[in-house]
Image (tube, rainbow, N blue to C red):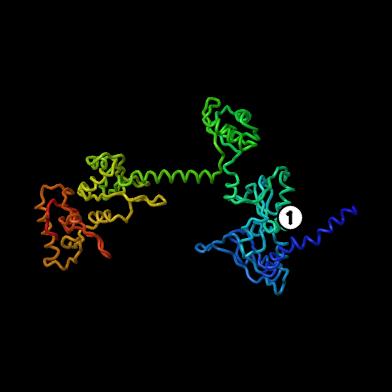
Amino acid sequence: MAAVAPATTTPAPATPSTEAAPAQPQANPALANSSLYVGDLDRDVAEAQLYEVFAQIGPVASIRVCRDAVTRRSLGYAYVNYNSGVDAGAAERALEQLNYAPLAGRPMRLMWSHRDPSYRKSGVGNIFIKNLDKSIDNKALHDTFSAFGNILSCKVALDAAGESKGYGFVHYEADEAARLAIAKVNGMLLEDKKVYVGPFLRRSERAAESGGRFTNVFVKNLDESVDDEALKAAFAAHGAVSSAVVMRGEDGASRGFGFVSFEEPEAAAAAVEALNGAPLAGKELFVGRAQKKAEREAMLRARFEDVRAERIARYQGMNLYVKNLPDDADDEFLRATFAPYGTITSAKVMVDAASGKPRGFGFVCYASPEDATRAVSELNNHMLRGKPVPAGRAPAARPGGQDHGHAAGDGQLRAGAAAGERRGAGRQGGRGRGRAAPAQRHPRGRRGARARARRRLRTGAGMPIGAGGGDGGAGGGGCCGGGGVTAPRPGNRPWTCPEAGMAVRHAGPVTPC
């Protein structure tokens, strides 16, 4: 004993110089500011309730509950500042007496407020604990790990219902305390459950450290006769199996899938390689690495985006957008209308999800861009059952799955929409340049313009509407600058031919309106 005493007393003077000195700058600002972070608050807790609780400890300088900038709903945490000039130890007493004290049915979690988040985000002194019993809460976890050093923060992860997820975090003031807790508690029993304790790693660090290595294997398409022992026996040939379980429903029947955990990553990889697609009890198995729900969703989302981008690139220039369709138009009517101009791979009239009625627009996809171009040139503003039907290339779908049928960025669609929807616009076209002139400048007024439009229709009798190459936009020969619509000027809306808004193309040169 005499030899041990000097050994324990000799390092004592060195300890404050090496460990306490770095910790002192972290504690002093907290005491000087007397500012506490209060977390895990109920959303209905307000500043007045917090003041009633914290004012019992000492003079409170200010309290602020952090809220959403838009909804003004509480974010579940607050800051309490004590008046250190009157009572320098009030904040420290509040931390000791009110930490994990209940407020509005939920225990508060207190810690010193650090304005500089670099120390908290550095991960120094932060440990991760999993396989916790459901009965262990924040206070129980704090009491268990406080024996190894000063704890800055301690939290058990909870689900939406307030139940423990079985894992938690403890942040020590000193990294030495964190290493000591890992060495002493890792593999020990807490509430009859063996817990894992290790250093906290961010998600990116965990992925880099694992390097694609795994020990847990997911198995599906299992026959109902396969139980835990049969599953373990099937995988034991590839390495030591620590556990194998077949998932069952409430009635005890197999749900057709299970999990196998290996002791070594190499054995798990070998089992996936050998048994994926292999038969078991008359069924072909699927065997793969067990993934978390968030990881699966991210993988499926990335796969879907790749397929979507490939599909958009493949059908670029082949997909047409058609609007102003007749009320009784369906998919077969749309296909029959556009079939003479090329091979159609799909034709779809969009319908309302609730009522099932057509929404007045649809899409036609051709097998080649040349067929789509031919259909646009022949059928744009073609009269279908008394209605001009604009047709143009469908713009690429916008992110987020928005309906590209309502896109307004295509000038050709805007022009076609004006021909069918803005009847009787009453504006006249400039000569050969597609400019709009005010109607009141015409010497004979609106009535004379309609008479001249009727005369031009009579001179173009026998030509199918929508046919002919005399577009004013392309060659300067069409009525009203081509296709019945002038190119829109800045600040002006597209307009139509004054003949009741009908979109008409003529075969030869015609005197513009």
Q: Is residue 286 left or right of residue 33?
A: left
x, y (%) of residue 480?
17, 58
Residue farthest top in this picture? 282
Q: Is residue 89 left or right of residue 253?
A: right
Which image quadrant is residue 52 in?
A: bottom right
Q: Residue at x 67, y 60 (%)?
A: 110
Q: Nearer the viewer, residue 249 or 113?
A: 113
Q: Which residue is mark 1?
A: 146
Q: Secondary structure at mark 1?
A: helix
Relative to 408, residue 234 above or below: above
x, y (%) of residue 174?
71, 58
Q: Nearer the viewer, residue 435 or 474?
A: 474
Residue farthest right in this picture? 2
Amino acid type shown at disc 1: Ser
Count of labels in the image: 1
x, y (%) of residue 105?
65, 56
Relative to 410, residue 88 above or below: below
Q: Is residue 360 visible?
A: no
x, y (%) of residue 500?
18, 56
Q: Is residue 229 visible?
A: yes
Which image quadrant is residue 25 in?
A: bottom right
Badge 1, how many Cα within 10 Å: few under 14, some, many 20+?
some
- Quadrant where the C terminus sits is bottom left
Q: Residue at x 79, y 61 (%)?
A: 14
